[in-house]
Structure formats: C-alpha cells, structure tokens
Image: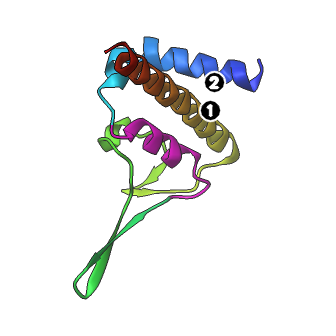
Amino acid sequence: MSVIDEIAAERKRQIEKEGYDFAHDDEHSEGEIALAACCYAAPAPIFTKDDRANAFILSDPWPWDIRFDKRPYDGNVVRQPGKAQRRNLLVKAAALIVAEIERLDRADKQRTAA
C-alpha cells in the first residue's frame, strides 16, 4: 500500500469508524482540525506560551478533550513517540489535513452558491 493509500484509508476510517463525517467536520470552522494535525505532525510536543504577571503558563494546543488525542502520554505529559508510532501519527495528521481541505472546499462552495 502506498503512503497516499494509507492516508486515504485513515481518512475513510475516521469517517466510518470514528463518525467524523463531513457534517461533523463542518462544525469545526475555527481551525481545530488543522491544529490537531499540527499536534500529530510535530516531531516533539509543542506548547503555547501564555504570559502572566510575574509568570507564564505553557499549554498543549490540542483543540479537543484529551480522550480524542492519539499521541503517547506519560502521565499527563505528551512524550516522544517511537518510530512506528511517529509514522502512524503522521498518517493521521495527513488525513486530518485532507479533512480540513475538504471542509474549506465545502465552505467555499456554500459561500459561492449563496
């Protein structure tokens, strides 16, 4: 199976097994799907910095509840995945990017039709 076939199969799995169909994806119009793809594709955990008076807070930018996150955790901290797991996360990220592109295309068609 080619990498493109793997990505297509993952996207199909997301729709059929997870229920993340077009209607579901269309509910996430604030970039959440792309942000999740970024989290999966990052070679190491990524964090956002929130400056506070005399301190700052680092938080993981994962856009949804942690139960939907497939990255490896050690306690409540994202850890570096192994090689096979990293590849799997990249396939998931690519499928999420496809989902976001499809969502944008549908939104453009709706705006054009209106």
| Residue at x 48%, y 22% (from the top left corner) | 105
Rendered image quadrant of residue 1: top right
Q: Amino acid at mark 2?
A: Ile
Q: Residue furthest bottom?
A: 54
Which residue in the structure is indicated by mark 1? 91
Q: Residue furthest right?
A: 2
Which residue in the structure is indicated by mark 2? 7
Pick whichever, 46 or 53, lies toward us: 53
Pick whichever, 101 or 40, lies toward us: 101
> Is residue 36 highlighted in magenta?
yes
| Residue at x 39%, y 18% (from the top left corner) | 112
Q: Quadrant of the C terminus?
A: top left
Q: Amino acid at mark 1?
A: Val
| Residue at x 53%, y 14% (from the top left corner) | 12
When the figure is inspected, residue 105 is found, relative to residue 58, above or below; the finding is: above
In what element is the residue under mark 2?
A: helix
Task: Report the predominant secondary structure element of the magenta stretch.
Answer: helix
Instruction: Give coordinates of residue 14: x percent, y percent.
Output: 47, 20
In what element is the residue under mark 1?
A: helix
When the figure is inspected, residue 93 is found, relative to residue 23, above or below; the finding is: below
What colouring style does the render use? rainbow
Instruction: Give coordinates of residue 13: x percent, y percent.
Output: 51, 16
Is the residue under label 1 in contact with that under label 2 (CB below 8 Å)?
Answer: yes
Instruction: Give coordinates of residue 29: x percent, y percent.
Output: 33, 33
Specify the segment rendered in magenta.
Answer: 30-45
